[in-house]
Amino acid sequence: MGPFPTTRTSAPKQKPADDALAFGKVMTDHMFLMNYEEGKGWHNPRIEPYGPLSLDPATSVLHYGQAIFDGLKAFRGDDGQIRLFRADRHAERFNRSARIMCMPELPVDIIRASFDALVGLDADWVPRKPGTSLYLRPTIIATDVMLGVHPAHSLLYFLILSPVGSYYKEGVKPVRILASDTHVRAVRGGTGEAKTAANYAQSLAGQQDAARAGYTQVLYLDGVHRKYLDEVGTMNIMVRIGDEVITPPLAGTILDGVTRASALQLMRDWGLAVSERPITIDEVMEAGRRGTLREMWGTGTAAVVSPVGTLGYKGEDILINNGETGEITQRLYDAITGIQYGRTNDPHGWTSVVPVAA
Ligand SMILES: *Cc1c(COP(=O)(O)O)cnc(C)c1O
């Protein structure tokens, strides 16, 4: 794959200081694009200066939301090399989202080549300050121009990049989450396993309700019984009761998180008791009351791990580990970030070094 036809920007942007970086507010100088037409397949891969897309107002994605994305990061290591974390697994998940949303898959080697080519070209945009990274946002949208509801015959793949600040500027910090008895995220047979735009649009109301009640995130329960833990916000959830770490199984409603898979692998490497099994909110609350709920945390690319200090449900608040980051949570954070920044060895070969363009 590659090299791809490249039009370099004639007006490079001013890069923000590493200290001023937030999440997803600034984009780099270039973007990768590729088109799909039925009968022709994926074609015309190219890199262009970053800029607006021009879309007809009748473009189907704007009406029916046939859109998928993924999110992964590139890290500048202490040795100066730029590493992607589990790019293959992200590319495979992107294709799984495509299948669920009736979109044509992209060959994994083309996805990977687009990551390497764009990050390599905009390598100077990978920030240097500890904890910072470059976020990659691959996306596919349906571009048929017509108002009938149908799987698209033409689509656009694009990849954009955004330098992001450290999620934890003052160390890993626990959050307050609310188990919702009113909002659900997904049901079996729906789109919960896909990273698709609609899932995030429909999560806004629950998130807003939780924020109004004084919590940072929503813990979603399953949509049928309203009792099994599903996910927290846009993260997978893990709880430690006694010496067992429990996370809900991949059974059709939750996203197969790359951080989730990495955390499970590491904890198994460490010899911890790890179960992927259904767990009810009542079991978690009861453990909280009895004092056996030792840790609870979310996992996701943005934060790596996000410890839960307080869990609210039906008017009751449970304080977990005195509102402090637990031992396994911290150990996972240190281990995963150590691999990402090339500070420790990478026994499972999760990182890949990006070749930097001259
Ligand atoms: C992206 C996402 C996650 C986390 O996945 P990672 O691959 O670990 O970043 C979890 N749940 C939802 C709903 C997500 O969108």
Image (cartoon, grey):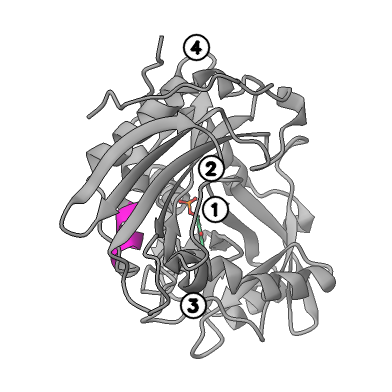
Instruction: Please name the residue shown 66% across and 85% down the image.
Output: 181
Report how far apart the C-alphas of labels 2 and 3 lie in the structure. Answer: 27 Å
Q: Is residue 97 magenta?
A: yes
**Of callouts 2 and 1, the N-terminal one:** 1
Q: What residue sits right under mark 1 in the picture?
A: 299
109 above or below 272?
A: above
Find residue 290 and report its horizontal and vertical position in percent.
69, 74
Residue ID for mark 3: 186
**Along the line of sight, the residue nearer the viewer: 194 or 130:** 194
Q: Amino acid at mark 3?
A: Ala
Residue density around tag 4, few if under 14, some if 14–19, many if 20 or more, within 10 Å: few
Q: Does any portion of residue 246 appear in the rendered image?
A: yes
| Label 1 CB sits under 8 Å from any ligand 1 atom | yes
Tell us which disc is closer to us: 3 or 1.
3
Q: What's the magenta region?
A: 93-99
Question: Magenta span has 118?
Answer: no
SS assignment at label 4: loop
Whether tag 3 and tag 4 are in contact, CB under 8 A, the answer is no
Question: For mark 3, does the 10 Å Cα neighbourhood hold few (<14), some (14 to 19), or many (20 or more) residues?
Answer: many
Between 61 and 298, which is closer to the camera in this rendering? Answer: 61
State the residue position of label 4: 79
